[in-house]
Structure formats: C-alpha cells, structure tokens
C-alpha cells in the first residue's frame, strides 16, 4: 500500500509539473488589439516572453518591433527600442522604426534597374531615389500572422503577397518572415521568399536600439564593433559609388571596439554625406552561407550587450541622423538625432546597378532565404 501511495504521489507531481510546463509554453505568446488605422484596418500586437523575462511586442502591421524589454546588469528591465503607441504613427510619422523592410532594403539609384535586358522604374520616395521598398513598402502592409510556441521559445510567422508590378517591382513575390525569441535571449529572424518572375529582393529589419533605454537619449557612449575590414563609400545622395574601400585609417574603422561618438563628428567626407554613420559595411565572412558575427554593442552605463549574427554580406550601421525632434514616441518621448542605432543586415544598397556587388536577383524555382540573430546579454562594469 505504501508503494502504491508513493506511486500515486509521484504521478500527481509529474502531472502538475507537465501542466505547469504546458501553461508556460501556452503563455509565451499572446495577441491583443493595438488599435485601428485611419483607413479602418485593425492592428494586432503579439507579445512574446521568455523564462528570463525578456519581452518583445510585434505588430502584424509592417512586422514592427514596438518594444523590447531586456535586463541590465542589475536586473532592471527597460524597453530598448524606439517606437510609438499609436499604429497610425507608424504610417505617417515613423522613419521605419522597428519595421520589416521590403521588397528592397536601402536605396536604389534614381529608382531604376535593368534585369534580363528590361529596365524597370520604381516608385521614388527619397529625392530621386527609391528607398526601403517605395511609397507603400512592406512596412505599411498588414501581414498574415501565425503564432506558435514550444518548451524553449515562441515564434511569430508573418506572410504576405506582393503582386507583380507593385511599387514597380516585377514578379508576384510570396514573402515570409519569422521572429523567434528563445530562452537564451536570442531573437532569430528568418526571411524567405519565392517569385513567379525574375525580380530583386533584399529584406531586412529596421529596429532602432538604445541599450540605455528607448527614452535615455544619445547612444554615442555605446561601444561598437563591426566585423568588417571594408565598406561601400557613397555619394552625396547616399548611393554607393561602386567602390569597396578599406576602413583602416578612417572613421569607418570599428574592427576594434570604440565608442560610437569617438569619431562621428570628424571632418570626413563620408560622415558629412551621411550626417554621421549611415553606411554599408562589407562583413568579413569565412563561409558565405554561414551565420557569423557581424557586430557587437555594449553599454557601459547599463551593462547591456547586443550581438548581431547574420549570413548576409553586409550590414547598414545607422545612427538615426535624421531624427530631428519632430517624432513623439512611447511615454511621450521626443526622439532626437542619435537617440538610437540600427544594424540592418542586408545585401549592399543599389546592388542591381553594380555588377561587382553580390547579386540580389531571385528567379522562379529559387528560394530567397536568410537569417539574422540578435543576442541580448549583460556584462559587468569594466575595470580599467
């Protein structure tokens, strides 16, 4: 009888443990309303939380990362991404804050490119150039959202169809992006796409990070490392010249960690063109298909760290040079110049017009597939 009672007790405990685990898995991701756009479209926000308390909220509108809460070295949580509380602001006010970018991240000169002998003209929205997919890019679309979870992570899969000729791009493109937050504080973003006609694709994520907190002001005290010996210089319109130039001996050299603000105001033509850093770095790669370290960032103030890994050939490092105090975001925060930084993993800007750059062409029967991982952590106070 005693053994039977022990067996019953063990069975009950096991059932309770499994039930708790299942409840934890179910509660990893939830969906609520984020309001309604002026055109009547309803917007949902999906909240993902891991066992360490790290929390991310993502909209089905443009795949926006609305906020991302991580701990500092003392165990305090803060939201480390810039953003808004009103969905309409993401359409009218936002300089792509937290957005999924497509069909083509970054700039295409004069909104024109040739493919298989045919010239295509894109919608221009950045002077005479096309930027981040055009006037109504992927950041302004409601994506089809499917949440899922398991015992160690939760995911949000977003998908949409971009019709042939949309914003001037050829081909009917079927795109999917999956965000996955695991218990090791890794946010994995997987992009995939197929087309029925030859086209160009360059998807990326445009989160504005501030490891001191979204409302903490300047990021110039952050320590940055970019794993790149070269970058692609630009002209006054921020279009690549086609050169691939060494960073050595220039303010573009982040091969050894340095503060973002150390060289940003130097008298250098590239910094003048960008009003700071707004350039594509050519990542050092050992294997073209592998996900490798692209950049790492550290805040001495909070101890927070961010490491970016990708299989892409480039990363656009941007220091929010065009924020000018005209945007009021979460917690009534007025976002100013250099209040955030972006690490947009990508193929190079204007690649279709530079044959020496890695190709961004996608053809029928092929699959566009790429992955980027943002890993969050902390470090103790540095002792000199």
Image (cartoon, rainbow, N blue to C red):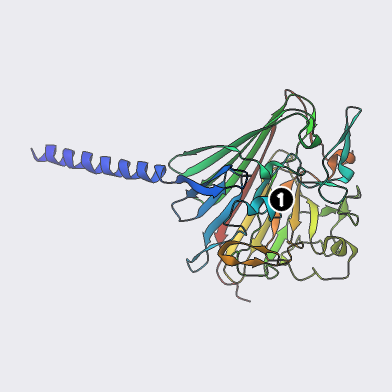
Q: In which quarter of the image is residue 161?
A: top right
Q: Residue furthest left?
A: 1
State the image coordinates of residue 154 (x, y, percent, origin top left): 49, 43
State the image coordinates of residue 135 (x, y, percent, origin top left): 76, 44
The C terminus: image quadrant: bottom right
Residue 367 can be seen in this image: no
Residue at point 92%, 27% (across, down):
117
Looking at this view, is 25 or 61 the one in front?
61
Q: Quadrant of residue 133?
A: top right
Looking at this view, is 314 or 339 the one in front?
339
Q: In which quarter of the image is residue 196?
A: top right
Secondary structure category for the residue under label 1: strand
In the image: residue 360, left or right of residue 367? right
In the image: residue 294, left or right of residue 155? right
Residue 48 can be seen in this image: yes
State the image coordinates of residue 36 (x, y, percent, origin top left): 56, 47
Looking at this view, is 218 or 90 the one in front?
90
In the image: residue 347, left or right of residue 209? right
State the image coordinates of residue 159 (x, y, percent, origin top left): 61, 35
Dot 1, crowdedness within 10 Å: few (<14), some or many (≥20)? Answer: many
Q: Which residue lies furthest to the front in this view?
A: 39
In the image: residue 228, left or right of residue 46? right
Vertical side of 297 occupied by 190: above or below: above
The N terminus: image quadrant: top left
The residue that disc 1 covers is 344
Residue at point 73%, 67% (across, down):
258
């Amino acid at each position: 009888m005693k053994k039977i009672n022990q067996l019953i007790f063990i069975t009950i405990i096991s059932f309770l443990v499994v039930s708790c685990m299942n409840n934890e898995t179910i509660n990893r991701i939830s969906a609520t309303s984020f309001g309604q756009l002026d055109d009547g479209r309803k917007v949902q926000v999906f909240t993902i939380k891991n066992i360490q308390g790290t929390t991310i909220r993502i909209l089905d509108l443009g795949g926006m990362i609305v906020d991302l809460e991580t701990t500092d070295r003392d165990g305090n949580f803060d939201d480390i991404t810039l953003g808004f509380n009103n969905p309409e602001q993401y359409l009218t006010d936002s300089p792509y804050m937290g957005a999924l970018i497509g069909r083509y991240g970054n700039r295409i000169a004069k909104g024109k490119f040739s493919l298989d002998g045919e010239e295509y003209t894109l919608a221009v929205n950045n002077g005479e150039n096309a930027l981040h997919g055009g006037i109504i890019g992927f950041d302004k679309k409601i994506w089809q959202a499917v949440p899922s979870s398991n015992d160690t992570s939760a995911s949000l899969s977003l998908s949409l169809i971009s019709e042939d000729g949309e914003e001037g791009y050829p081909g009917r493109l079927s795109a999917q992006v999956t965000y996955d937050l695991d218990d090791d504080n890794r946010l994995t973003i997987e992009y995939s796409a197929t087309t029925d006609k030859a086209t160009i694709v360059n998807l990326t994520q445009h989160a504005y990070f501030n490891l001191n907190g979204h409302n903490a002001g300047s990021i110039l005290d952050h320590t940055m490392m970019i794993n790149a010996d070269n970058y692609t210089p630009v002209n006054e319109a921020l279009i690549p010249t086609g050169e691939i130039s060494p960073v050595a001996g220039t303010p573009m050299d982040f091969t050894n960690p340095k503060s973002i603000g150390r060289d940003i105001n130097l008298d250098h033509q590239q910094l003048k063109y960008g009003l700071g850093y707004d350039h594509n770095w050519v990542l050092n790669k050992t294997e073209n298909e592998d996900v490798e370290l692209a950049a790492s960032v550290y805040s001495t103030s909070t101890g927070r760290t961010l490491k970016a890994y990708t299989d892409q050939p480039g990363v656009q490092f941007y220091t929010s040079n065009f924020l000018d105090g005209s945007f009021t975001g979460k917690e009534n925060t007025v976002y100013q110049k250099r209040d955030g930084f972006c690490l947009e993993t990508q193929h190079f800007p204007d690649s279709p017009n530079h044959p020496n750059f890695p190709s961004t062409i996608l053809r029928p029967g092929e699959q566009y597939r790429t992955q980027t991982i943002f890993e969050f952590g902390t470090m103790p106070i540095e002792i000199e």
